């Protein structure tokens, strides 16, 4: 009989039918199962919500786990995640946001829960591998030496380390929400706090940075999951609003880090320059106003915050997946 931990709630914002069963098998294989599993079906046609036999099979495969399936909001991935969290009772619970195409190793929950409780952290992030669409391994991220060379089970995730190693080069070596676990109430508090969270489009690194600023994040020095690289990912749809947000979202993170002294003005400028170059490559024709705004911001030495803030506010107003708490 497997252990069921009632302090853990797993939520899956479902959209991609082709990978879902593989992802859910990763949950079934856990040495420690979540006490609650919530799935919000945002897929075209609602393949899970309209298949009572599949729901029953999932329930039978997860004895002791409280399973609930609901219809997604059909707005965007973050709205789907927000809906899942709103329906869950996260008081005194940890939450894992498992994206529907990623995989977790059988000891993922055991390790994350053990280290969160041992450290009293509110956020744990672990190493992961990259796999292709067929599930074959294709690589792993290059992480800072302090983590790569560590002999510890986990290390404190320092905000200045995140800022210096990730922001100027637009390099999110930490990963996604799928390879992290959070204290549920602390996550909601962070996401609803404009003072601590400005990361629409980059909710993963923004969340990790937010917890690290509060000295409440740890990084587990062990690969416990896989990130699937596929043509159906939002980051592969270069014309999408989601991709645009993921590009522009680096600038408010960089601006905040620069103002707080975590990176230099030169490093902040380098970040904005990279963002502007990417934006011009993909969106200059369809969004010339934002391209001009980024150019004007660079002309100010990336120091006139009012220029970018106006641009960012205008973009958020047109983004259907944006939730006001993340401004």
Image: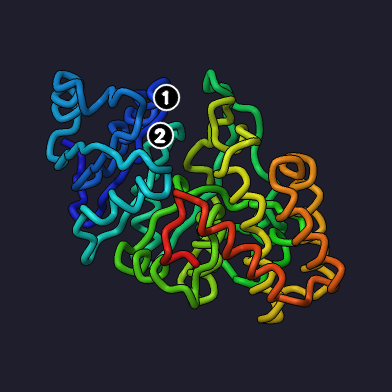
Q: In which quarter of the image is residue 19?
A: top left
Residue at position x 54%, y 61% from top? 199
Dot 2 surroundings within 10 Å: few (below 14), some, or many (20 or more)? many
Q: Is the Cβ of the residue at disc 1 closer than 8 Å to that at disc 2?
A: yes
Against 5, residue 24 (above or below) is above
- The answer to which of 282 and 13 lies nearer the viewer is 282
Q: Is residue 37 left or right of residue 183?
A: left
Would you name the residue on which mark 2 appears?
100
Residue at disc 1, secondary structure: helix
Residue at position x 79%, y 57% from top? 292
- The answer to which of 30 and 17 lies nearer the viewer is 17
Would you name the residue on which mark 1 appears?
19
- The answer to which of 98 and 147 lies nearer the viewer is 98
Residue 238 lies, in percent from the top left, at: 65, 36
**Separation of residues labelled 1 and 2 (CA atoms):** 7 Å
Residue at position x 66%, y 33% from top? 139
Residue 298 lies, in percent from the top left, at: 83, 66
Dot 1 surroundings within 10 Å: few (below 14), some, or many (20 or more)? some
Q: Quadrant of residue 147?
A: bottom right
Residue 216 lies, in percent from the top left, at: 46, 72
Q: Which of marks 1 and 2 is nearer the N terminus?
A: 1
């Amino acid at each position: 009989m497997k252990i069921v931990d009632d302090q853990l709630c797993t939520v899956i914002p479902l959209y991609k039918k082709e990978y879902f069963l593989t992802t859910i098998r990763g949950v079934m294989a856990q040495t420690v199962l979540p006490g609650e599993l919530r799935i919000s079906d945002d897929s075209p046609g609602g393949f899970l919500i309209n298949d009572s036999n599949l729901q029953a099979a999932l329930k039978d495969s997860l004895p002791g786990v409280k399973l609930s399936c609901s219809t997604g909001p059909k707005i965007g991935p973050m709205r789907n995640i927000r809906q899942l969290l709103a329906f869950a009772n996260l008081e005194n619970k940890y939450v894992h946001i498992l994206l529907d195409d990623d995989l977790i190793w059988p000891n993922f929950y055991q390790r994350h829960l053990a280290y969160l409780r041992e450290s009293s952290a509110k956020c744990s992030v672990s190493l992961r591998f990259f796999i292709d669409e067929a599930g074959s391994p294709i690589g792993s991220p290059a992480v800072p030496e302090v983590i790569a060379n560590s002999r510890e089970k986990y290390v404190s995730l320092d905000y200045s380390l995140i800022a210096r190693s990730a922001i100027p080069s637009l390099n999110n070596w930490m990963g996604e929400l799928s390879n992290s676990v959070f204290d549920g109430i602390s996550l909601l508090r962070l996401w609803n706090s404009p003072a601590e969270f400005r990361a629409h489009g980059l909710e993963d690194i923004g969340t990790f940075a937010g917890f690290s600023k509060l000295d409440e994040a740890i990084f587990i020095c062990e690969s416990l999951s896989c990130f699937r690289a596929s043509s159906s990912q939002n980051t592969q749809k270069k014309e999408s609003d989601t991709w645009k947000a993921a590009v522009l979202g680096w600038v408010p993170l960089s601006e905040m880090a620069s103002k707080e002294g975590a990176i230099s003005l030169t490093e902040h400028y380098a970040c904005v320059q990279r963002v502007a170059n990417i934006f011009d490559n993909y969106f200059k024709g369809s969004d010339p106003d934002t391209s001009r705004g980024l150019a004007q911001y660079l002309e100010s030495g990336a120091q006139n915050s009012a220029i970018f803030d106006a641009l960012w506010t205008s973009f958020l107003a047109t983004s259907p997946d944006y939730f006001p708490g993340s401004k």
